[in-house]
Image: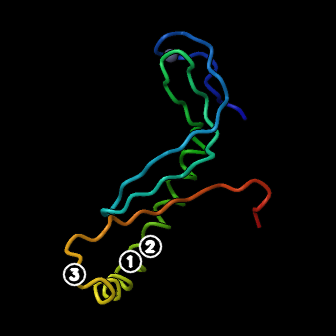
Amino acid sequence: MKGLITICSECRTPTELREITIEFERKGIKAAMSGIPAMVCPSCGQEYVPGEVAGDVIDTVSRTIDATEALLKRTDHRRRELFPDRSELPPERLELALVPGASS
Ligand SMILES: [Zn+2]
């Protein structure tokens, strides 16, 4: 991949290529996406996600959250029927994982 940050701009330590998890919160829906390649500083923990990857991930997660919001609205009514005595419903959470070799 081009444009990778190989030296940490915070502490000048050489970075390492790792897979990280990025968490998003949008419209009250939390989403975590793991398996994202990024350059990570082993010293200070700074993460550098290549812009190309970050843009693609954010695009995809945004669309997925929009679709999930519609789905959650439809299922919320049913959840309240199933758990009538539960005043606090668990927070909606969407988890996405990149599975190697499973791309279509
Ligand atoms: Zn650093």
On residue 72, the disc is 1
Query: What type is the residue that disc 1 sits on?
Result: Leu
Q: Is residue 18 left or right of residue 62?
A: right
Up/down of 65 relative to 11, above or below? below
Circles 1 and 3: CB distance less than 8 Å? no
x then y, percent, for residue 98: 66, 55
Circles 1 and 2: CB distance less than 8 Å? yes
User: Farthest residue toward the front?
Assistant: 85
Up/down of 92 relative to 78, above or below? above
Up/down of 6 relative to 53, above or below? above
User: Farthest residue toward the right?
Assistant: 101
Q: SS of the residue at dot 3?
A: loop
What residue sits 52% from the left and 30% below the top?
Answer: 47
Query: What type is the residue that disc 2 sits on?
Result: Thr
What residue sits 41% from the left and 62% below the top?
Answer: 93
Q: Which residue is mark 2?
A: 68
Residue at mark 1: C-beta within 8 A of ligand 1:
no
Q: Nearer the viewer, residue 10 or 102?
A: 102
Give the mark, 3 or 2, whose residue is nearer the N terminus: 2
What residue sits 48% from the left and 66% below the top?
Answer: 63
Q: CA distance from mark 1 to mark 3?
A: 19 Å
Q: Quadrant of residue 65?
A: bottom left
